[in-house]
Amino acid sequence: MKIRIGIVGGGAAGLSLARFLSEDPALAVTVFEASPEPGGKSHTLERGATRVEMGTCYTTTGHKTVLRWMRELGIGLRPVLQIKFDGAKFEDFVKAGDGPPTSVQILTYLIRRRAVLKALEAESPEPWALEEAAMPISAWLDKYRLPKIFRLFLRGFTNMGYGFLDTSPTLHVLRWMDWHLIWSGLRKKLQMPRQGWSEFWRRLAADLDVRLNMPVSAIERQDGQAVITTADQSRHVFDHIVCAIPIDDFNRLTTPTPDEAQVAGAIRWNSYTTTLFATDEWFTDHHIQSFSSALIPGAPIGRILSARYDGHAPDLGGHIYLSGQFSGAYNPDEMKELLVKDMQDRGVTVTNIIYQKTWKYHAEYAPDAIRGGLVGQLRDMQGDQQTWYTGATFSHESINHIVNFNERLARRMLQAMPPPHTLAA
């Protein structure tokens, strides 16, 4: 009899873990997704001939497994063109920072990054590693005299919706800003799927047992099993379940364990809005424009962090662009007003707001929780009450980090289950 595994959430975390686990014939894996489409924050908007990524955007050279899956599924890639920062080439903006050459500062950063992340893997990390992981990344960069890297991270971290550099814990930045991302960004190696991220996840889900339009209403865990009840009141019994949604949302479906409750209390979710809009005329000679006035620490919430040119669509109002904004406590109408005002200040008139999406985005750990050993707690709670955890809370928001995390998690899950398993070796 197969071991039954139920996964709550059909975003990148739930689907990629299901893909890994389904390679083992001893497992029967079912994914429950509340929305009508798989992929979660990988959301491709299609209007006629126009296709725009509202959520997940790029692949880097670090997306090794994802790129292999894309080749297998017939998903092509197109390059991201020139990125500009305040109107100049991004690499020139980085080079203009103080201190040693960019290459020297990158090497120093990578060495220090590896030291911290490796120290955090220990059963009892040393106090210096916990303190460095918890401090704001701007203070960490100052400590190691890396002003050019600060400028690099304005685009690579804050611009991506992950928070300001004077408040974001160093741990989050170290997880995200790896060699592959830095190399891909500076050397123009970023790519986007031609058919769209949503289509990629549809094709990946086609060979899996994914139940769409199937929100989970309750989870009961007892006697070594878990029962998932869906909104249609059907009950599904599993030997193991996986939380692939935000843990605070998961806790509302079940009686949370002490670890689950503590972890949910140690996390603050950010809010990030992407808006597709049209103008008569703006930049068309490069792909992306970022704005330091919205990215520097202390900048007002709601300003446009960057805009991406997505082509000319007369039926939608002209040249179309995708913007990113920190949402804060603003509602959708207020976000639209802020966008229009910001564009007016740049001398550009918005002719049409086509579509807007606000995301529950980037689980940020409380610094005191990091100092108190949160990273080890996240690792040690895996498998408790037959429950496993993945997604942004336990890894990082980005797809390549989630997929790499899930490849390791799948092996760990199988090692905890009765043999034989082909993936556990």
Image (cartoon, rainbow, N blue to C red):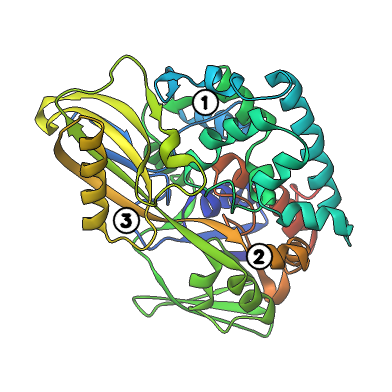
Location of the N terminus by quadrant is bottom right
Q: On the rendered structure, is 369 left or right of 162?
A: right
Residue at x 45%, y 34% (from the top left corner): 292
Q: CA distance from mark 3 to mark 2?
A: 24 Å
Residue type for callout 2? Trp
Vertical comparison of 46 with 208: above or below: above
Labelled disc at residue 36: 3
Q: CA distance from mark 3 to mark 1?
A: 25 Å
Q: N-terminal of the two: label 3 or label 1?
A: 3
Residue at x 58%, y 36% (from the top left corner): 153
Residue type for callout 3? Pro
Where is residue 96 shown, x and y percent of the image? Answer: 58, 20
Q: N-terminal of the two: label 3 or label 2?
A: 3
Which of label 1 and label 2 is nearer to you?
2
Residue at label 2? 388
Q: Residues within 10 Å of mark 2 (few under 14, many from 20)?
A: some
